[in-house]
Structure formats: structure tokens, C-alpha cells
Image: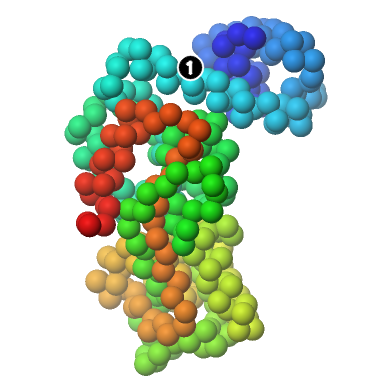
Amino acid sequence: MEMRQLQMFVTLAEELNFTRTAERLNTVQSNVTSHVRHLEEELGVRLFDRYPRRLVITDAGTQFLPYAMRVLATVEEARRTMRFGDEPAGPLRIGAPESIVTYRLPPALRRFRQRHPHVMLMLRPYVDWPLAEPLQNGEFDLAIRIADAIGEKVLGSRRIGAERIVLVAAPKHPLVQRATVRPRDLAGQHLLLTEEGCAYRKKFERILNARGVRPQGVGEFASVEAIKQCAVLGMGIALLPEVAVAREIRSGALRVLPWRGPDVSMSTHVVWHKDRSTTPAMRGFLDALDDTLAPRR
């Protein structure tokens, strides 16, 4: 089994197209086809189903993919270590929710860039899917998670702050004038929420469900900015981290509802996989987070 075969397999699994895979790897399509076929013969399984107009990864291919990614990540890490020693260098893949990437990380990113210019930062947004596998196979080196606690035992973590989660609406929304807003007051209201899987959305929906509260409707958005703009236009009540709407609150475009239900706020953690070694780049980024975000002791 050759590294080139693994690289072609992983790239083909991402692209599901021989031509694009060859272009990405600066080779010819027949080379990709040959290497993947030899890998399948060595493993004794079919990694892809080939149809006239499409390519589909098989169950065996899906099962093999994280192992191949892990091998490639380990080899790349070894190369960086041999070349740069303890000096952070090479790619560093950070997974984080959009609100954290946009409103929390920039000071840490600037500090890290100033200290370690040879590291190529790769920020990859995600909602809140299980992190153990992408952290183990190298899809992420580190990830930021908004959660009450980190439940996966294979993950190491460090708390770096708190996220106050607020309900906001346009100034003319009827609930803005209330002295208090309780869960029952949201019955019949239109809510503007992040995608399913978001930790604070799930926590909020559990609060409403436990009290039998049914909103009139729910708008689901992949973009925090889209949620904010819809709320500003009076299209409903948005649930977002306070840091994401701070500017709109200061300008008066949005108002925080006086929520008197159970607290929806959560902690922010940086997490990594315990089975992977901590690279100099990872340690450098953790230091930058400590200097800019972590609560002072």
C-alpha cells in the first residue's frame, strides 16, 4: 500500500470525479484509475461503485476512509516535525461554528499569525456534529465547540469562555415591550433558528418542549447573518449568541427580550483527540486562545 494510492483514494472520495481528482493532484485520469484499482485489489474490496455518469463510494470505502486520512495526517505531521522541529509550520485545520469563527476567533487568529507565520490556517465551519472521528482522522486538528460539557471521552478539552445566548427581535415586536418573557409567551411566535444539531438550539427546544410550548413556525438558517437580517426586518424572534448581535443591539436595530425562562447560555471549549499527538502548531494555537479568549484565573 503506497502513500500515493491513499492520497488518490482520499481525494477521489472528496471529489467523486476522476477528472477533478486528477486536476487536484496534478496527474492524469488514467493514473488515478490505476492507483485506486490497485488499492482495491490489495484490500480485496470495491471502494467505489462506478456508474456511467456518477461515482459512489461504497460502504467499504466509507469504512476505510478515516483510516486513510489518519495515515496521511500522521505522515504529514512527521514530515513537518523532521523539517521544522519544534517550530510551528504546515497546515492547521480548525473546526468552529460560524459565530465563533466570525466574532470570537479573529483576535486569536491575529496573535497566532504574528507568532507563527509559517502555519497555514484552515478554518472550517461546522454545526455540532460528533467530533471524535474528524479530530482523529485529521479533518480537524482542533475544534471549538459551544456546549454545556464535552461528552466524548476520547476528546481532550479546555474551556475558553462563556457564550450568553439571547433572544432578540426588532424594536417594534410586541414582546420587546414586555417586562418579562417566559417560555409560554413564545407560543404562536415565529422563531428564527440555526440549523438542527446546534447545541444551544437543542437546549432551547428542550425547554419549550418540556412546557408544551409550540411556536407558530420555525425558520431554519445555515447563516447567522441571515438570521440577524430576518430579525431586523421583523420576521421573527432570533436565538443567537450575544456576541453575534452585539453591534445590532448597540445600534438599536435589535432588542434583547427580557427572558425569564431557564438559562440557555453555554460554555465554549477547544477540543482535540487524545490519541493524536499535539503538534507545535496546535500548541501555538492553544497558547493564542489562552492569551485572547480564556478566562483569567
Q: Residue at x 48, y 38 (%)?
A: 273
| The N terminus sits in image quarter | top right
Residue 37: give x, y in percent of width and height: 73, 11
Q: Amino acid at mark 1?
A: Val
In this picture, residue 205 sits left or right of residue 235: right
Q: Residue 272's quadrant in the figure?
A: top left
Residue 78: give x, y in percent of width and height: 42, 16
Helix or strand or loop: what does disc 1 sit on?
helix
Using the image as rendered, state which of residue 286 and residue 62 is in the foreground.
Answer: 286
Residue 227: give x, y in percent of width and height: 45, 64
Could you tell me if residue 226 is visible in this image? no
Farthest-out residue, left: 114
Q: Residue 17's quadrant in the figure?
A: top right
| Residue for badge 1 | 75
Q: Is residue 151 above or below residue 135?
A: below
**Number of numbered labels in the structure image:** 1
Q: Residue at x 34, y 74 (%)?
A: 254
Residue 216: give x, y in percent of width and height: 61, 80
| The C terminus sits in image quarter | bottom left
